[in-house]
Image (tube, helix red, strand yellow):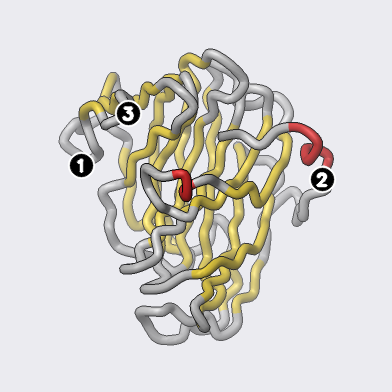
Amino acid sequence: MRVLAVVLCVALPLLGLGAVWLVLSGLRSGDGPAAHATSLTLGSGRVVWSDDFTNPDSGWFVGTDGAGSTFVYRDGAYVISGSGDTAHAATAPYSTGLAAMAVSASFTLASASDLDAGAGLRCDHAGDDSTTHYVAFLFPDGGLQVFRYPGAAESSADEPTSILIGYVPGVGQVGQSNRMSLACITVSVGNGSQTTRILVQVDAGTVHTVTDSYAAGGGSGWNGGVESEGNSSVEYDDFRVRNLEG
């Protein structure tokens, strides 16, 4: 569900044209010890898992979901095709929750019926009780949005909240390959709330950043995945999970 219109003129907190440096002091995971103070960028740490989709048995969901969306390996890509005003999502088969995670992938919007047919990446909350997740979408007109979903699947309570809106000219068009990176970094957990720093970048452009807090329980680690929206077919390739802490 895309949030349109008047808020597109809202100034974003943009931190430079290159790497964004964050200092997280006393980072504490709900299921682990305090981490040392670390300066993190989207390129920090190391790649801990990757998939180029040449092996059709690498573990991603294959088949048709309850909404009729299809998920297949095809010609060295992972292809998601769906319709309607719904999201079509798949979580990577790397299940280790990371307190400071970045995911990246190249993707091509192979077909889209309208400007609301987006494609992008997601951070799934790996906690026992909190299913809040974030999705970064790129749209055919270059619109870029990050949403927070409360995670009440298959109910009206799962309505998204837009927490970042931007515009990246010349990207996202049908047939065009773009690369996106999305980081979710747990800043703090306590008193029933979690604060997360989110970074998103398309190709080698500006890194957009926003900090978001929400009611949460359970652990504070993240898993990564992909997601598309609307009447679309999206081809994903070269998916990577990076542990920003090392």
Q: Is residue 163 above or below residue 235?
A: below
Percent x, y of residue 236: 40, 30
Which of the pair 104/152 is nearer the observer? 152
Q: Is residue 246 visible?
A: no
Could you tell me which residue is drawn at 52 percent across and 83 percent down? Answer: 191
Q: Are marks 3 and 2 in contact (CB under 8 Å)?
A: no
Pointer 2 residue: 10
Where is mark 1, residue-wise? 59
Determine whether 180 is above or below 176 in the image. Answer: below
Residue 37 appears in which quarter of the rendering? Answer: bottom right
Instruction: Tell me the element at label 1.
Output: loop
First in sequence, mark 2 or 1: give its number: 2
Query: Considering depth in this image, is 77 or 188 the residue closer to the camera?
Result: 188
Looking at the image, which residue is at 20% across and 33% down? 55
| Image coordinates for residue 139, horizontal then vertical, percent | 61, 28
Q: Residues within 10 Å of mark 3 (few under 14, many from 20)?
A: few
- The type of residue carrying mark 2 is Val
Rendered-image quadrant of the C terminus? bottom left
Left or right of 41: which side holds 52? left
Element under disc 3:
loop
**Which one is in front in this view, the residue at disc 2 or the one at disc 1?**
2
Quadrant of the image occupied by residue 48: bottom left
- For the residues labelled 1 and 3, the Cα–Cα distance comes to 21 Å
Q: Residue furthest left?
A: 57
- Which residue occupies the foreground of this view, 193 or 93? 193
Q: Identity of the amino acid at label 3?
A: Ala
At horizontal 30% and vertical 24% (from top left) the residue drawn is 68
- Describe residue 55's horizontal placement relative to residue 156 as left or right: left
Residue under pointer 3:
67
Instruction: Give the answer, above or below, for where 240 lies relative to 111.
Output: below
Q: Is 221 or 239 nearer to us in this picture?
A: 221
Coordinates of residue 210 in the picture (x, y in percent): 67, 58
